[in-house]
Amino acid sequence: VWKEAMRDLDTDVSSITKSFVNHVQTSLARQPYNLDNLGAYQAAALSVRDNLLVNWNETSLQYTRKAPKRAYYLSLEFLMGRTLDNALLNLGLKDKYADGVEQLGFSMEDILDQERDAALGNGGLGRLAACYLDSSASQELPVWGYGLRYKYGIFQQLISPEGNQLEAPDPWLDNQNPWELPRLDVAYQVRFYGHADRLNDGTPRAVWAGGQEVLAVAYDVMIPGCYTKTTNNLRLWESKPKRGFDLNSFNAGNYEGAVESSNSAAAITSVLYPNDHTTFGKELRLKQQYFWTAASLADIIRRFKNIGKPITEFPDYVAIQLNDTHPTLAIPELMRILIDEEDQPWATAWQIVTNTFFYTNHTVLPEALEKWPVPLLEHLLPRHMQIIYDINLLFLQSVERKFPGDRDRLGRMSLIEEGFPKQVRMAFLASIGSRKVNGVAELHSDLVKTTILKDFVEFEGISKFGNVTNGITPRRWLDQCNPELSALISRTLKVDKAVWLKELTRLEQLLPFAEDAAFRAEWAAIKQRNKERLAHHVQVTLGLTINTNAMFDVQIKRLHEYKRQTLNILGVIHRYLTLKNMSAAEKKKVNPRVVFFAGKAAPAYYIAKLPSPPNHRQTIRLIVNVARVINADPDTKDLLSLYFLPDYSVSLAEVLIPASDISQHISTAGTEASGTSNMKFCLNGGLLLGTVDGANIEIAEEVGESNVFFFGHLTPAVEDLRYQHTYHPVPIEEKCPALAHVLNQVSAGLFGDADVYEPLLNTIRQGDHYLLSDDFDSYIAALAMVDEAYLDRTEWVKKSIRTTAKMGKFSSDRAIMEYAESYWNIEPLSVV
Ligand code: 26Y
């Protein structure tokens, strides 16, 4: 009876409408006649979820039966975006569902638009984790993600009329989340505070007791692969009090105190920290990190134990990838479990640990390198602090053996940084506790090896340190966001998208079509329709009318000084001032340009706590006010306009990226580890204007330097230039008159609020850490080359086609297979 009843779900249109209506009547308890779009979205999602669950169960069963080595991706951020469209495409059911919902009187587009983004991440690092999950499932790899189920994701950004960023909470769970399964039966206790007492019985064991215990409860999110049954799992932990409230306080009549403790447990997973690239040493953030790593490890160990192998074989069955240093506490936590609970000798435990973990570094910026104060760690995690001290002692002894008497080196390499207070250097702990360490693009991996981890390369040997250049999933970032281009590619390659979406280097076969005028016309027409789609979106959401005959120039990413949005806006002002001085005849030769910005800045609340607060919030304000002036100027507005689109998100990126002619990736050389949106733009036939930094370099290697617009100083020059700024400053009027003129116009109040911008402008006039004054002239020259190139539209479209054609390398399938083969040693497993 079971077997008969358990056959796969039917996926013909009539079964789809039946399942939809069934969910409306039962799961949602609603009447068909008053069903709105939101209800329709929920019913469609629940129906699709049924399909995913069948595959998800089958996949779990296979993994349990065959017990392959598995990999776990530990990330504090997963920036998933919307799920319904992606799930429909990966299942190959989009057309049928579109048919089905239409028959029921709904439009697929409207239904898809009801979904809120799952925005449990800040930016690049979190979106990379999401792309890697998609690729793992699509490549049939046994990989699970582990993260936190934040009640509030990244804040919603509002822009006030004056141009200030305002932040509102992101209550993404308010409408129920059909994509998660609460697993109330999968729960672990996580301890904080208390005291740790060494047994001193000849073993390294200690007992950690007392303090506060919090429950971690699992929520599972299905991750469907593309055209495969494999459906992996993303397990997110929610914190809750071990008891509903503290019984002792309750009995003593302290009702408020009783509820307070329950609140503090729930607080752990209440909100995503909205800062990237700047650490703050907040206790709650450390609690999040330990809560999540402890629950994840307990879960992984329980699953391993079900196989029935001795604990020494743990690394033969488990690989754990640390997404940056955020989960580094997993290293002392696994040591604690092995020593205190599994009774292993120190050396055995360390052997297991250093064969299990892999660490990816995502930045070399000093302010982003995590350090935790020793007193805080001692208080919150006393046993882990002991273990870290022990690891450090043994490690420094081995360094001393290799480099006898080199005290400087010991000081540099110690896990503990001297100072008041002492701090634990998490990147060092992650490095020595891992089997391998990698950066995320060639240049960045070289910088990791020659700067922050130089001593560790000298000590442990170069072979431990590698590179895996980032990638993006072509499912979301081409097929889903640009369906017309996807269809054109399938028609042209004469192969189903199921093939080329998983073998992206096949795009190379588009190259000859760059010479085909009819193909170019289709290519250009699709870009044009994507621009109109974006313009329509802006019209509907913001009530603004955009000139779709212009070149679309886009910079979208987190606001940060090193990403130099300021350089871009100063370049826009330069263009405006130049246009203002042009004769009517000169203006005739100018191609109109629309400049788009989007991105969130770290909230003022966090910034205020920094010693020297960065100015990127002022940059937003400047952009908004420049836009106000420029867009209203009758002399220039047909040739130049500017928009700051609020509340940047994965969904907004899906509309912006396919519409771009040129996108900007203009970080100071050596500061952007990789960048991944650069890959997304190029995959969609947008050209790249950028510095010689991160993955821009490898993109240029693939598509050819003639198809990208590079400018600016190179990485080796940066250190010298900064030295010059500090010790031999040259007044900006002398060094870069064009930039000085632009700054002076802002200071003079051309865009209002003159004094508001002074601190921002002064970071350029004095110090100029990110070298705007060094790169400005070559930036302006590069912008002019873009203008020039765009005038020859035929050649431009050829460049666009060639760019897409050569993006195969940047599929996250390639990247995840590199991790699988060269790092984790895991293999694909087919679920049939
Ligand atoms: C420690 C805390 C303040 C912190 C939180 C988040 C530090 C860093 C981050 C996020 C870093 C991040 O997003 N890095 C980006 O990772 C991408 C994926 O590898 C890269 O493409 C991108 O260049 C890098 O900035």
Image (spheres, rainbow, N blue to C red):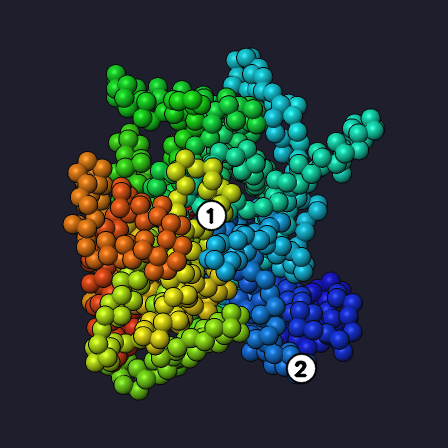
- Residue 295's quadrant in the figure? top right
Total marks drawn? 2
Amino acid found under the numbered disc labelled 1: Ala
Name the mark on residue 105: 2
Indicate the secondary structure of the residue bearing disc 2.
loop
Question: Furthest residue to the front?
Answer: 748
User: Which residue lies under the disc numbered 1?
Assistant: 602
Query: Is residue 391 rendered to the left or right of residue 750?
Result: right
- Residue at 53% x, 60% y is 81
Q: Where is residue 208 in the image (x, y as percent from the top left)?
A: 61, 23
Residue toward you, 350 or 380: 380
Q: Which of disc 2 and disc 1 is earlier in sequence? A: 2
- Residue at 35% x, 79% y is 549
Quarter in which the C terminus is drawn: bottom right
For the residues labelled 1 and 2, say whether their Cβ atoms are less than 8 Å apart. no
Indicate the secondary structure of the residue bearing disc 1.
loop
- Residue 436's quadrant in the figure? top left
Residue toward you, 203 or 750: 750
